[in-house]
Image (cartoon, rainbow, N blue to C red):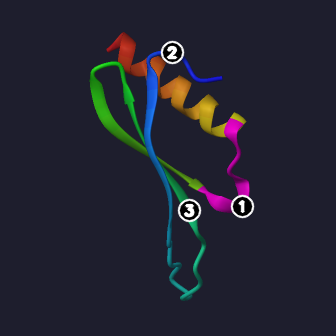
Amino acid sequence: MLDPDVKIVKINEEANWTAQGANEPRIRVEFRVGPHGPFVEKFNKAEYDQFKRDTVLNTFAATVRTT
């Protein structure tokens, strides 16, 4: 579950072309931490799930709050 001060602004899929010319799609998550941001995290689409997303965003938010 996301921390209360983390607000997701937008989630979309984007192409990620490798050096070999293959497309490995990514999920792009734009979010804010309280009044700070917007920030962006990108996830490999094949490995993306809500738990992983929330963990990464909450960890990032903790860093923003302590700096």
55 vs 63: above or below: below
18 vs 31: above or below: below
* Secondary structure category for the residue under label 1: helix
Q: Residue at x 29, y 32 (%)?
A: 37
Tag 3: amino acid: Arg
Residue 49 in the magenta stretch? The answer is yes
Dot 3 or dot 1, earlier in sequence = 3
Residue 3 in the magenta stretch? The answer is no
Quadrant of res 5? top left
Q: Residue at x 53, y 78 (%)?
A: 18
Disc 3: CA contacts within 10 A as few (<14), some (14-19) or many (>=20)? many
Left or right, 55 with reference to 63? right
Task: Return the x and y of residue 15 as percentages of the image width and height.
Answer: 50, 73
Mark 3 and mark 2: span between their CA atoms? Answer: 25 Å
Q: Quadrant of the N terminus?
A: top right
- Which segment is the magenta one? 44-50
Q: Residue at x 54, y 24 (%)?
A: 58
Between marks 2 and 1 in the image, the one whose residue lies nearer the viewer: 2
Mark 3 and mark 1: span between their CA atoms? Answer: 8 Å
Marker disc for residue 26: 3
Dot 3 or dot 2, earlier in sequence = 2
Task: Return the x and y of residue 28 as percentages of the image width and height.
Answer: 48, 53
According to the picture, the residue beneath numbered tag 1 turns out to be 46
* Secondary structure category for the residue under label 3: strand
According to the picture, the residue beneath numbered tag 2 turns out to be 4
